[in-house]
Image (cartoon, rainbow, N blue to C red):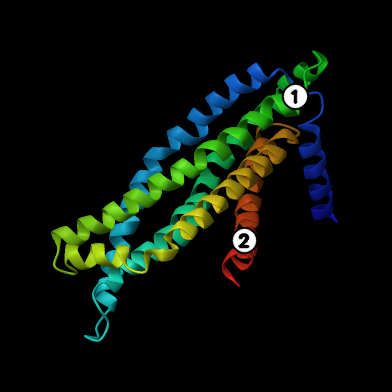
């Protein structure tokens, strides 16, 4: 029954975001701040992880191909499919759910236990809309750009291995990325669509647990943990659902 309590509370919180909205200018300023805090400041870890993951994927794929019948451009093609379809939109979302989700939950949880949220409500401010909406909108706006950066540096990492080693020639690597490129546009759309959905999940679920934290520092820590766990589970479930809807004819 506890899960149904959280589901009901989550949807009630999402409904309250649209009740008595503040001025657009207030939301815009806060949204810009959240774009920087949640998206721009996450680019560092995204770039580093994507570069090294692209490098590892090329090494693993190249060393696993031991048949002369398999063309060497398969390495680049495999990297392209892995980076665009799963790593950049899904795996990076799971990783950032830990970074961004815990940050959101701890921030709102601290505001709740120190009665800052209660103070906003006493002043007649829609605290849920004022605190949560900019986070959701901001990450949904910036996260597709973060995913594109992840794709680029994933390919760059793979190209670095191809250029500096003899596992696969750079020509074969680039040909593998370009081959079967007729569906690349849809693949990019699929990845960016998933990134927008996952951005909403990370921010809304984490905000729910932080906003409803009660007690003290221990409860804030538990809310942060729950935010990461439930965000990750819902992302994985949504990934299966979106894949079935968009990729299966």
- Above or below for 214 versus 157: above
Observer able to see residue 106: no
Q: Report the residue at 42% width, 60% height from top.
A: 184
- In the visual, does 182 lie left or right of 218? left
- In the visual, does 13 lie left or right of 144? right
- Above or below for 174 versus 192: below
Residue 50: x, y in percent? 36, 51
Residue at disc 1, secondary structure: helix
Does label 2 or label 1 sit earlier along the sequence?
1
Q: Report the residue at 67% width, 31% height from top.
A: 133
- Nearer to the camera, 32 or 214: 32
Residue at disc 2, secondary structure: helix
| Cα gap from disc 2 to disc 1, whole angstroms | 32 Å
- Above or below for 201 versus 214: below
**The disc label shown at residue 127, or none:** 1
Q: Report the residue at 64% width, 61% height from top.
A: 237
Residue 105: x, y in percent? 63, 37
Residue reaching furthest front? 182
Observer able to see residue 170: yes
Looking at the figure, which quarter contains the N terminus?
A: bottom right
Q: Report the residue at 33% width, 46% height from top.
A: 48
Q: Mark 2 points at which residue?
A: 242
Residue 159: x, y in percent? 23, 57
Foreground: disc 2 or disc 1: 2
Question: Mark 1 and mark 2 in contact (Cβ < 8 Å)?
Answer: no
- Residues packed near mark 1 inside 10 Å, few (<14), some (14 to 19) or many (20 plus): many
- In the visual, does 163 lie left or right of 127? left
- Nearer to the camera, 21 or 39: 21
- Above or below for 170 versus 143: below
């Amino acid at each position: 029954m506890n899960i149904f309590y959280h589901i009901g509370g989550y949807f009630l919180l999402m409904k309250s975001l649209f009740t008595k909205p503040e001025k657009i200018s207030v939301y815009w300023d806060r949204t810009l701040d959240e774009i920087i805090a949640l998206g721009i400041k996450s680019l560092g870890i995204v770039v580093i992880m994507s570069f090294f993951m692209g490098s590892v994927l090329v090494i693993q794929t190249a060393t696993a191909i031991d048949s002369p019948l398999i063309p060497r451009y398969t390495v680049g093609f495999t990297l392209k499919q892995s980076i665009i379809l799963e790593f950049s939109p899904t795996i990076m979302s799971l990783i950032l759910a830990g970074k961004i989700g815990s940050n959101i939950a701890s921030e709102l949880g601290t505001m709740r236990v120190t009665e800052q949220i209660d103070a906003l409500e006493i002043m007649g401010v829609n605290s849920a809309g004022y605190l949560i909406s900019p986070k959701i909108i901001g990450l949904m706006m910036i996260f597709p750009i973060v995913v594109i950066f992840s794709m680029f540096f994933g390919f760059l990492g793979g190209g670095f291995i191809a250029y500096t080693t003899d596992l696969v020639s750079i020509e074969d690597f680039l040909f593998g990325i370009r081959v079967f490129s007729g569906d690349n546009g849809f693949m990019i759309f699929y990845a960016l669509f998933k990134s927008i959905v996952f951005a909403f999940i990370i921010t809304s679920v984490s905000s729910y647990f932080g906003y409803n934290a009660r007690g003290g520092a221990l409860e804030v820590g538990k809310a942060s943990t729950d935010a990461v766990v439930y965000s990750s589970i819902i992302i994985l479930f949504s990934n299966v659902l979106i894949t079935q809807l968009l990729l299966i004819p």
